[in-house]
Image (cartoon, coloured by chain):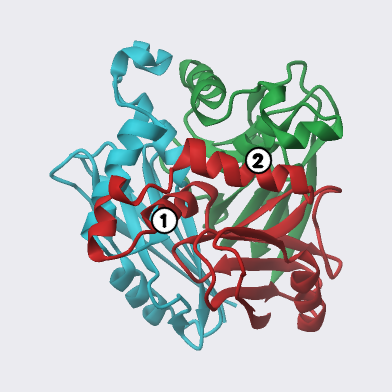
Chain colours: A green, B cyan, C red
Amino acid sequence: MKSHTHYLWFNTKRRQEIIDITDTVAEQVEQSGVQEGFVLVSAMHITASVFVNDHESGLWQDILKWLEETVAPWEPGRYKHNLTGEDNAAAHLRSLTVGHEAIVPITKGELDLGPWQRVFYGEWDGKRRRRVIVKVLGE
Amino acid sequence: MKSHTHYLWFNTKRRQEIIDITDTVAEQVEQSGVQEGFVLVSAMHITASVFVNDHESGLWQDILKWLEETVAPWEPGRYKHNLTGEDNAAAHLRSLTVGHEAIVPITKGELDLGPWQRVFYGEWDGKRRRRVIVKVLGE
Amino acid sequence: MKSHTHYLWFNTKRRQEIIDITDTVAEQVEQSGVQEGFVLVSAMHITASVFVNDHESGLWQDILKWLEETVAPWEPGRYKHNLTGEDNAAAHLRSLTVGHEAIVPITKGELDLGPWQRVFYGEWDGKRRRRVIVKVLGE
């Protein structure tokens, strides 16, 4: 069995941002030498997400709007968590909804994704150093 | 370490549909010969889901209604993604909410599910050929 | 390849409750002897969740309120599933939203979590015996 671990770092300019990390994940899979296995891509923060969806900028805007209007409005006064001095409770709820990790299958040495599937880092409370783990397991 | 990869194909009659795929996943686990491991069941599309829940038709109706009324109304005019000519932005948001993959543990050669747990494919934009990967890893 | 399987049992006093299980998961990883791998932590019920987020009691209250007010109000009369005699359809929808499982990477024999990440069991319909599987795979 082989394993390979790599950490990606981000520091977004905007507080909410969606970043396509598919190529970086694919590079790590190549470096691992794993032909058949899984790669776990997981945000190491509790106000961020990793998800698989579409590389389409209109959709990214839809996602950010939906997180604000439907999933969890930012409004700091609405949440008890923010009594700790934070203002980011909404980002926690957004992370719970979209999820913080994805597992991508590796087949014949490559990410086994459907034609439109791409892997994204979703930053819900950025403008600071943030990390994602990419961990490959297989043979 | 053993691995085993299989693709399931779907072409639903309705645009939204929930399909129990537990038996097919269990068959693939049996074929793999894996006694201890994980099976990843993952939709290869960005407007579909794989999830674990209950085999109960009233609940399936509740899920479809909830996706429409609470999670993301279909209303094509509401979303920027649909300016590309698509009308399915809501299906993307539904996929993000419910998730597109599940990992089921394998113990003593069998799916290690709780008494009521079943694995489902959730089609949120069907009536066309669609695919789910079933990938077993273990020994 | 090594594997290790353990079942956690819960019987919450309240019907909805959030329980930090990080230390128990870490103990199982230690017992497994796995240095590099994944640990799957998965609820074996369809009205419960496992998720990774913050150990902060104000946030836990926010999550329970958000599940009731935004994600899926309990109101039994609202759901077809409850025609079966159940009253817990909302708990199924909450499980679908938050997810029922998490995969945590193991690096150098330890849970490879970010500084604030903790693993939780989310009980959405408790006051009865419930189970979570912790399954370690790696080497």
Which residue shows up at 79% across the image and 83% down it?
A: C31
Position of A51 relative to C134 (above/below): above
* Quarter containing the C terminus of chain B: bottom right
Q: Position of residue C97 (x, y in %)?
A: 49, 46
**What secondary structure is found at the residue carrying circle 1?**
helix
Instruction: Please report, as a chain letter, where disc 2 is located.
Output: C
- Apparent side of residue B12 relative to residue C78 in the rendered image (left or right): left
* Quarter containing the N terminus of chain B: bottom right
Residue C92: numbered disc: 1
Q: Amino acid at mark 1?
A: His
- Quadrant hosting residue A19: top right
Which circle, 2 or 1, is nearer the viewer? 2
Q: Nearer the viewer, residue C94 or A20?
A: C94
- Quadrant hosting residue C65: top right
Q: Nearer the viewer, residue B121 or C42?
A: C42
- Residue wearing tag 2: C62
Position of C132 relative to C54 (above/below): below
Instruction: Please report, as a chain letter, where disc 1 is located.
Output: C
Q: Looking at the image, tell me whether mark 2 or mark 1 is earlier in sequence order.
A: 2
Q: Position of residue B78 (x, y in %)?
A: 36, 14
Q: Amino acid at mark 2?
A: Asp
Which residue shows up at 28% across the image and 55% down it?
A: B59
